[in-house]
Image: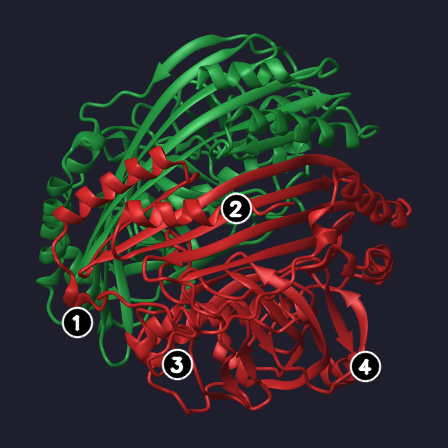
Chain colours: A green, B red
């Protein structure tokens, strides 16, 4: 791979003011067991090279899976041709050069690719059987685990050469229950707002030890029972009330309300024709109140085990921590070299690419909400009337990241400080700064957990990124809830 | 361009993977120009071969993918999949007993466009410049211009071998003027069929110098312009009209074949051969894409299926399998929806609207509860308010949460003019504007 990277850079013609090349080999394994079926075993293998060039301040990017001499020569021709065709546009600046030469390997205890398939299947089948104990109304039960490994080489014309190996592991459960009138689902330990088989649950930059810590078999019966119980549960009431949410639910809320809006390329308008703009405009840094003073948010690509952790981003910039919101006030952005330079700052090391075939974009790393001093138990005990909601099931937010609505898998009434009836089809809505202004309690450090989500989409062509969210349970006042 | 997929290598790969193998191979070349705030922000060129492998041996299923037909790489994956099959328990009770596509069934293969194949970076820049310059500085331009060529082969060890070349060109233009924005989208298999010249004028016209009004509260009639209607029907089709969801009772229409499920002005068909959409000949299992009537004057008359769910559609797959590892699930799903046009002109629709909301685009429409087709999304890129059958003001973008079947049941008029569009989970959709009565949509 290193030879390929150096060969491509050696083909870059004179007149190219900057070039970087990434050679990426991604392997993916999915093992899925299911109720009433044999499940899936999937092995994916992807190897290719992507080249970015800057000529007269204009980008060109080309990528290929053809790694023979003709393929490599063609990728250079394509990238250079694009950049030259763009001559005359506003020049791109990259800021300080990146010259790092390093190797980095994500830590793990057990290499998941060496664990026998039979052991993985045994664990998953046992979890499915436990979920099935909820009875005949269990229509679908799936337990899955996924493993990813990226071996990648980054090199640029400024002298950088970085080799990284990143291993990720994750797994989870999905149970769907049905009767003649309704169908309901429960997920564990994290919901994913998509229906792909596999790539569900909790993920970490770690080895197989991350799977054994999930307790899939131990939790499966409860998950199945709740799915069945939801079928006969009352509908969520339509009212304005106090909302308590789990850390898993807060992960998606934070993602949409604070994560995407604070990507610097979005603030610079490059996503306007796709997912939109942002309320977090550059002139609002240090002045815009995102939420209550107890709300502080940071992005940190150095969190041990976080799914958004790495040694260096895909421009060779070291992983780092960046404060985005402090005491409720918006401070700044996640950025890459180009967007940081446009905002007269330094890259936050958040330029990431989905494989060899995509150009780096500003992406979330591990977006984390600083813990508070309360606890889930205290929050519920301190609530006279409200709802407690868990796990995303469908969400939408507008193109400025203000007006949102989140569906959830499950809810419970809170009455006089205690959990009451199970509720189904609960959703809540809000407008970002107004909603977060109502945050009056956050769980403490002992409830803090980093949720790994392998399904964040952005860009054209679409890039799917693996990210983490450090969260705690939280409480919000005066929230609109309901089924519709 | 010579076809890069060599049939001899495909057959060698089939032999290496062994009995029960289906290969779904795509050799893709896609190119893209992106722009924002009237300047180029990114360019992209990608060439890749994707080889998706599915082995179904006595009901045991193993799958994989790689990006080459190189013999050594194929052999390595074949060994891993073979090992996996020995570990897997037999799944013959699962409905995954091996099924075969009828290799003799005729396929309508669309014609690839040489104009799209030959599109160059300079040609993309020329399109961009024409739209940007046509705006004459009155608005910032964002969007993208894209062209792609995909050679597809689906083959199995039972003698099936299908191939086709698909081309596609698209232009998306979003004009921004302060807080206001408007968008135009065009997509076609043939780049020469996309008329770039009117785009700037359409955007300028959409950025009409009208006053802004406060947000309306309550329920009112809503005119969904064609691109908004495309988002509605693609989301409805994906959520409600697949055979797996039908058979398992997961969808709103499950068990209701022959019933009136939406209003009688709605006739919806899936047809991969209709040139009004973006035609393609066969699905990832190699099954020809059959024309499949789904809703006839409001009555449910069909759903789409794949080989596994063929029993729902009379024992024959309709040709709507999805790719292995598809990020939107494994169930069969509509691919080429066509909503039948009505007779209403734009003036007729506005006149029928009287007072209400005009929605050009629905964005981020997501399903909250699939069983009752409840979705939530927002309007975007020009939302207007009409009174007395005329557009009189800009209306703020609004969040709309509604049941799709209720909206389709409240359609009062269907436009005569249709537009073509696409969704990330559907190859193409064609729809006219829909005038929706007050009631199901609450602002």
First in sequence: mark 3 or mark 2?
Answer: 2
Q: Chain of mark 2?
A: B
Q: Can I make out residue A87 in this image?
A: yes
Tell me the CA gap for discs 2 and 1.
44 Å
In the picture, the disc for residue A137 is 1
Callout in the foreground (2, 1): 2
Task: Give the residue at x 18% y 67%.
Answer: A229
Q: Chain of mark 1?
A: A
Q: Is residue A351 above or below residue B281?
A: above
Give the CA separation, mark 4 to mark 1: 52 Å
Q: Return the residue nearer the eye: A51 or A448.
A: A51
The residue closer to the viewer here, B259 or A423, is: B259
Disc number for residue B253: 3
Q: Quadrant of the C terminus of chain A?
A: bottom left
Q: Which mark is residue B347?
A: 4
The residue tagged with tag 3: helix, strand or loop?
A: loop
């Amino acid at each position: 791979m290193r030879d390929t990277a150096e060969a491509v850079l050696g083909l870059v013609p004179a007149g190219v003011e900057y070039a970087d090349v990434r050679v990426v080999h991604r392997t993916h394994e999915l093992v899925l067991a299911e109720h009433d079926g044999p499940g899936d075993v999937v092995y994916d293998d992807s190897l290719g090279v992507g080249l970015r060039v800057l000529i007269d301040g204009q980008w060109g990017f080309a990528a290929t899976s053809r790694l023979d001499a003709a393929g490599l020569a063609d990728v250079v021709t394509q990238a250079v041709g694009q950049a030259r065709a763009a001559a005359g546009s506003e020049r791109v600046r990259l800021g300080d050069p990146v010259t790092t030469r390093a190797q980095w390997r994500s830590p793990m205890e057990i290499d998941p690719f060496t664990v026998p398939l039979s052991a993985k299947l045994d664990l998953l089948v046992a979890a499915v059987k436990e979920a099935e104990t909820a009875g005949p109304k269990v229509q679908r039960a799936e337990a899955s685990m996924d493993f990813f490994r990226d071996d990648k080489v980054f090199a640029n014309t400024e002298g950088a050469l970085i080799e990284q190996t990143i291993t990720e592991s994750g797994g989870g459960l999905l149970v769907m229950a049905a009767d003649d009138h309704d169908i309901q689902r429960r997920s564990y330990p994290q919901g994913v707002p998509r229906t792909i088989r596999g790539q569900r649950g909790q993920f970490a930059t770690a080895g197989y030890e991350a799977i054994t810590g999930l307790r899939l078999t131990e939790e499966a019966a409860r998950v199945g029972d709740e799915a069945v119980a939801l079928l006969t549960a009352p509908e969520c009431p339509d009212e304005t009330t106090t909302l308590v949410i789990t850390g898993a639910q807060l992960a998606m809320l934070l993602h949409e309300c604070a994560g995407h809006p604070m990507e610097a390329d979005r603030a610079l308008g490059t996503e306007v024709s796709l997912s939109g703009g942002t309320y977090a405009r550059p002139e609002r840094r240090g002045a815009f109140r995102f939420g209550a003073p107890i709300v502080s948010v940071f992005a940190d690509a150095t969190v041990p085990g976080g799914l958004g952790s790495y040694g260096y981003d895909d421009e060779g910039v070291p992983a780092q921590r960046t404060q985005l919101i402090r005491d409720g006030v918006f401070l700044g952005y996640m950025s890459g070299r180009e967007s940081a330079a446009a905002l007269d700052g330094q890259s936050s090391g958040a330029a990431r690419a989905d494989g060899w075939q995509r150009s780096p974009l500003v992406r979330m790393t591990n977006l984390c909400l600083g813990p508070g001093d309360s606890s889930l138990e205290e929050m519920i005990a301190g609530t006279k009337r409200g709802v407690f909601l868990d796990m995303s099931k469908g969400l939408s937010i507008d193109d400025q990241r203000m007006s949102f609505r989140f569906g959830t898998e499950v809810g419970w009434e809170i009455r006089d400080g205690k959990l009451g009836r199970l509720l189904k089809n609960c959703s809540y809505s809000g407008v970002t700064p107004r909603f977060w202004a109502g945050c009056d309690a956050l769980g403490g450090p002992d409830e803090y957990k980093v949720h790994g989500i392998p399904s964040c989409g952005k860009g054209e062509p679409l890039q799917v990124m693996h990210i983490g969210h450090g969260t705690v349970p939280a409480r919000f006042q005066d929230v609109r809830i309901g089924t519709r | 361009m010579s076809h890069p997929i060599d049939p001899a290598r495909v057959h060698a790969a089939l032999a290496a993977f062994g009995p029960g193998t289906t290969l779904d191979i795509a050799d893709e070349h896609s190119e893209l120009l992106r722009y924002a705030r009237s300047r180029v922000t990114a360019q992209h060129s990608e060439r890749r071969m994707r080889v998706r492998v599915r082995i179904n041996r006595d009901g045991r299923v193993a799958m994989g993918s790689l990006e080459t037909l190189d013999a050594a790489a194929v052999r390595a994956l074949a060994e891993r999949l073979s090992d996996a099959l020995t570990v897997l328990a037999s799944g013959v009770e699962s409905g995954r007993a091996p099924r075969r596509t009828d290799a003799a069934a005729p396929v309508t293969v669309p014609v690839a466009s040489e104009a799209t194949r030959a599109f160059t970076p300079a040609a993309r820049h020329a399109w961009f410049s024409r739209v940007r310059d046509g705006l004459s500085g009155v608005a910032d331009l964002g969007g993208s211009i894209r062209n792609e060529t995909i050679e597809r082969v689906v083959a199995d060890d039972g003698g099936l071998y299908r191939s086709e070349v698909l081309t596609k060109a698209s232009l998306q233009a979003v004009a921004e003027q302060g807080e206001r924005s408007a968008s135009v989208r065009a997509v076609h298999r043939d780049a020469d069929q996309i008329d770039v010249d009117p785009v700037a004028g359409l955007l300028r016209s959409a950025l009409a110098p009208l006053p802004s009004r406060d947000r309306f509260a309550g329920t009112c009639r809503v005119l969904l312009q064609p691109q908004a209607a495309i988002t509605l029907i693609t989301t409805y089709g994906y959520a409600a009209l697949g055979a797996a969801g039908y058979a398992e009772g997961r969808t709103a229409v499950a068990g209701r074949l022959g019933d009136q499920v939406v209003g009688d002005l709605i006739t919806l068909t899936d047809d991969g051969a209709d040139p009004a959409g973006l035609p393609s000949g066969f699905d990832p299992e190699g099954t020809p894409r059959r024309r499949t009537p789904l809703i006839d004057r409001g009555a449910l008359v069909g759903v789409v299926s794949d080989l596994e769910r063929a029993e729902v559609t009379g024992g024959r797959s309709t040709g709507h399998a999805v790719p292995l590892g598809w990020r939107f699930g494994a169930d069969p799903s509509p691919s080429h929806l066509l909503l039948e046009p009505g007779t209403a002109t734009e003036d007729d629709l506005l006149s029928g609207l009287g007072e209400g909301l005009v929605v050009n685009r629905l964005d981020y429409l997501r399903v909250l509860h699939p069983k009752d087709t409840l979705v939530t999304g927002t309007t975007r890129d020009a939302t207007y308010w009409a009174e007395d059958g005329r557009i009189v003001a800009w209306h703020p973008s609004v969040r709309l949460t509604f049941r799709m079947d209720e909206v389709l049941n409240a359609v009062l008029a269907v436009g005569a003019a249709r537009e073509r569009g696409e969704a990330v989970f559907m190859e193409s959709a064609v729809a006219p504007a829909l005038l929706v009565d007050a009631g199901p949509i609450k602002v």
